[in-house]
Amino acid sequence: MRYMGIDYGTKRIGIALSDEGGMMAFPDRVILNIGIGASAKEILSMCKEKKVGMVVLGESRNFKGEENIVMGDIKKIKEILEKEILVVYQNEMFSSAEAARPYRTHKGIRERGENKMLDASAAAIILESYLASSC
């Protein structure tokens, strides 16, 4: 089964896909967040196109384990998506920081233009984490 990983953000949504066997995760694309309903529709279209069987959605929590502000929108998009496809949460803590690591210079500053796929890389980390924990 192929899986889709999602790193949901208020401006951009990172998308990752697994191989057909569900063993490895790869960054796929970043889409603009054009609203919960429209973004959900675009994601469902990708799921059909890529024959995705399950979506792994990053669960946004702070260090205390409490939901972050964006979690309200994540719950709404999950509610829409799960009408057509199985959706599970996976903790996304540190996924964006981990994804950004290769793009940082020795001074700790991101180089311009090199982080276009950063959100998709974070989605791949979320998906990899889920795949590793479900084996």
Image (cartoon, rainbow, N blue to C red):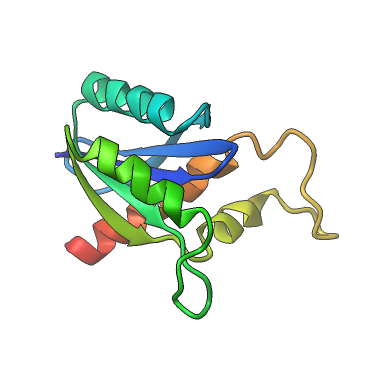
Residue 54 percent coordinates (x, y): 20, 42
Pick the front one: 97 or 57: 57
Q: Which residue is found at the position 39% from the left and 54% from the top?
A: 58
Q: Which residue is found at the position 64% from the left and 57% from the top?
A: 101
Q: Residue furthest bottom?
A: 64
Pick the front one: 23 or 56: 56
Q: Which residue is found at the position 29% from the left and 20% from the top?
A: 45
Is 131 drawn above or below residue 93 in the view shown?
above
Image label count: 0
The reply to whether residue 29 is visible in this rendering is no
Residue 88 percent coordinates (x, y): 24, 53
Quadrant in the picture for the N terminus: top left
Q: Which residue is found at the position 40% from the left and 48% from the top?
A: 74
Quadrant in the picture for the C terminus: bottom left
Residue 132 percent coordinates (x, y): 27, 62
The reply to whether residue 127 is visible in this rendering is yes
Residue 68 percent coordinates (x, y): 51, 63
Asked which quadrant contains residue 86, the reply is: top left
Pick the front one: 131 or 70: 70
Asked which quadrant contains residue 51, the reply is: top left
Pick the front one: 126 or 22: 126
